[in-house]
Image (cartoon, helix red, strand yellow):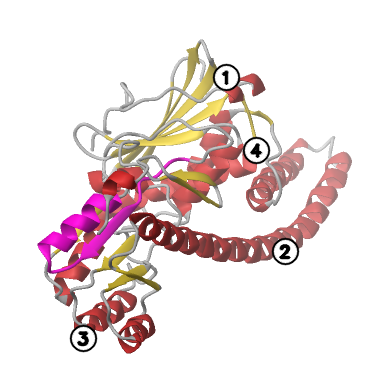
């Protein structure tokens, strides 16, 4: 029997990005997330889907898993259609197949999950109740990741569940690292090939300008070449910073100039009349921040792309608003950047998982963008929060420290930016 009273309600297991606390009380749907430090990653509640026709056995699983901090969802019917529909809707971290399933149902469910692209990577744990080795092997060969005897101690059940979730996450992050390294090498090579000719163009234009000082009508064209090459060089530096390995290279950054450049580049890649991007800056604008301009540009691009995809999903034109401001509090000074869209918003069940690696609800999505944006911001001493707007759309808020000493304290918690009203069409 699974005795939930023997469980510790605040267990933890460590992932590649720090401590992942499995505790149902840590997060609420719609909450922008818990505070964190450099030693502790953003906490995330792990979700488990259990499948078993027995009410009593589902209740025992629910008691044990929820007592260990998991959010538990249940399916009583072992039909492939019902299990797949629940898995697509919930997007669990783990699927547990109960001991009361027949070997035919179990193998069919395993194969169906592995064949569904959106949940194919979800680990599967099967429970056995004295079945033969052939029964267990059939489940493992059909796609299950591990098995456990039904009457095992609850600590063993939790250890298996956490290990499977952790292993899947680490394997995914290792794959992501390899892909990013390959992309970085390719992009660095392209930038290198552009820099050579660009230096020749700029150097030749500088020499030509010296010979045309007394011919202003012709000099204006040379000045245009120099301005264009200087702008291209600046953007190449930002692009190189986005793929540079190692710790971020922090330096003073004028956020408004960077945002203007990011918006200009972003809208050039969109169809005409697709959407409108507004940049709003209050007063004299936010103070300068200490950050890596290239990586910060990547964060802005990732959030703009996410907002654009959200707006496009509902059809018709839309609006994205970028709003920057300074925030002062006793713990330090911060720059707050809000990216607000008037899309459909984020389902409450997914709000606390939005920054998980590989988590995506979009067909064909990679689940990389928001995770990478969150990690880059964390490396620069800041963080990203998210909340749905009161009427429509979502608001992502990036908090960045103004001074190094501000990095010692977390940015203020907000459930809703007070002035982050949804943009009007």
Q: CA distance from mark 1 to mark 3?
A: 64 Å
**Sooner in the amino-acid sequence: mark 3 or mark 2:** 3
Q: CA distance from mark 4 to mark 3?
A: 55 Å
**Sooner in the amino-acid sequence: mark 2 or mark 4:** 2
Residue designated by label 4 = 292
Residue designated by label 2 = 189
Tell which of 46 and 221 is nearer to you: 46
**Sooner in the amino-acid sequence: mark 1 or mark 2:** 2
Q: Residue at x 34, y 59 (%)?
A: 153
Vertical relation: 149 (above or below) 68:
below
As helix, strand or loop, the secondary structure at mark 4 comes to loop
**Image quadrant where one finds the C terminus:** top left
**Sooner in the amino-acid sequence: mark 4 or mark 3:** 3
Could you say which disc has been placed on residue 104 in the image? 3
Magenta span contains residue 47? yes
- Kindly tell me whether residue 315 is visible in this rendering: no
In the image, residue 341 lies at what x, y percent? Answer: 31, 40
Q: Of discs 3 and 2, which sits in the foreground?
A: 3
**Image quadrant where one finds the N terminus:** bottom left
Within 10 Å of the Cα at label 1, are there few (<14), some (14-19), or many (20+) other Cα atoms?
Answer: many
Residue designated by label 1 = 287
Q: CA distance from mark 2 to mark 4?
A: 21 Å
Residue 226 in which image quadrant: top right
Q: Residue at x 31, y 53 (%)?
A: 47
As helix, strand or loop, the secondary structure at mark 2 comes to helix
Q: Residue at x 37, y 56 (%)?
A: 158
Within 10 Å of the Cα at label 4, are there few (<14), some (14-19), or many (20+) other Cα atoms?
Answer: many
Query: CB under 8 Å between callouts 2 and 4?
Result: no
Vertical relation: 341 (above or below) 400:
below
Q: CA distance from mark 3 to mark 2?
A: 53 Å
Q: CA distance from mark 1 to mark 2?
A: 35 Å
Q: Which range is magenta? A: 42-65
């Amino acid at each position: 029997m699974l005795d939930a009273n023997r469980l510790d309600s605040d267990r933890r297991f460590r992932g590649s990005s720090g401590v992942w606390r499995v505790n149902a009380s840590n997060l609420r749907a719609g909450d922008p997330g818990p505070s964190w430090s450099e030693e502790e990653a953003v906490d995330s509640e792990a979700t488990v889907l259990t499948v078993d026709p027995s009410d009593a056995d589902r209740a025992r699983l629910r008691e044990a898993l929820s007592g260990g901090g998991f959010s538990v969802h249940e399916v009583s019917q072992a039909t492939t259609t019902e299990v797949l529909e629940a898995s697509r809707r919930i997007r669990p971290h783990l699927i547990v197949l109960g001991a009361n399933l027949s070997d035919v149902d179990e193998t069919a469910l395993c194969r169906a999950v592995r064949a569904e692209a959106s949940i194919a990577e979800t680990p599967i744990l099967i429970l056995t109740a004295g079945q033969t080795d052939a029964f267990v092997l059939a489940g493992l060969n059909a796609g299950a990741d591990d098995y456990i005897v039904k009457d095992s101690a609850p600590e063993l059940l939790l250890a298996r569940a956490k290990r499977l979730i952790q292993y899947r996450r680490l394997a995914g992050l290792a794959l992501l690292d390899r892909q990013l390294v390959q992309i970085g090498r390719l992009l660095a090579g392209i930038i290198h090939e552009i820099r050579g000719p660009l230096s020749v163009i700029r150097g030749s234009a500088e020499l030509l300008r010296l010979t045309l000082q007394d011919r202003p009508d012709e000099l204006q064209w040379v000045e245009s070449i120099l301005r264009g090459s200087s702008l291209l060089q600046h953007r190449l530096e930002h692009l190189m910073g986005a793929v540079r390995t190692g710790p971020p290279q922090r330096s003073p950054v004028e956020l408004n100039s960077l945002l203007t450049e990011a918006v200009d580049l972003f809208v050039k890649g969109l169809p005409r009349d697709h959407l409108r991007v507004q940049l709003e800056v209050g007063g004299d604008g936010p103070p300068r921040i200490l950050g890596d301009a290239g990586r910060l540009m990547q964060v802005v691009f990732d959030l703009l792309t996410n907002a654009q995809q959200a707006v496009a999903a509902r059809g018709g034109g839309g609006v994205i608003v970028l709003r920057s401001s300074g925030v002062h509090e006793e713990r330090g000074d911060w720059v707050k950047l809000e990216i607000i869209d008037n899309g459909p918003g984020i389902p409450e069940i997914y709000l606390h998982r939005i920054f998980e690696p590989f988590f995506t609800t979009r067909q064909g999505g990679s689940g990389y963008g928001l995770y990478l944006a969150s990690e880059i911001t964390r490396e620069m001493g800041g963080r990203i929060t998210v909340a749905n707007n009161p009427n429509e759309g979502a608001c992502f808020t990036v908090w960045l420290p103004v001074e190094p000493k501000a990095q010692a304290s977390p940015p203020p918690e907000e459930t809703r930016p007070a002035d982050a009203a949804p943009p009007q069409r």
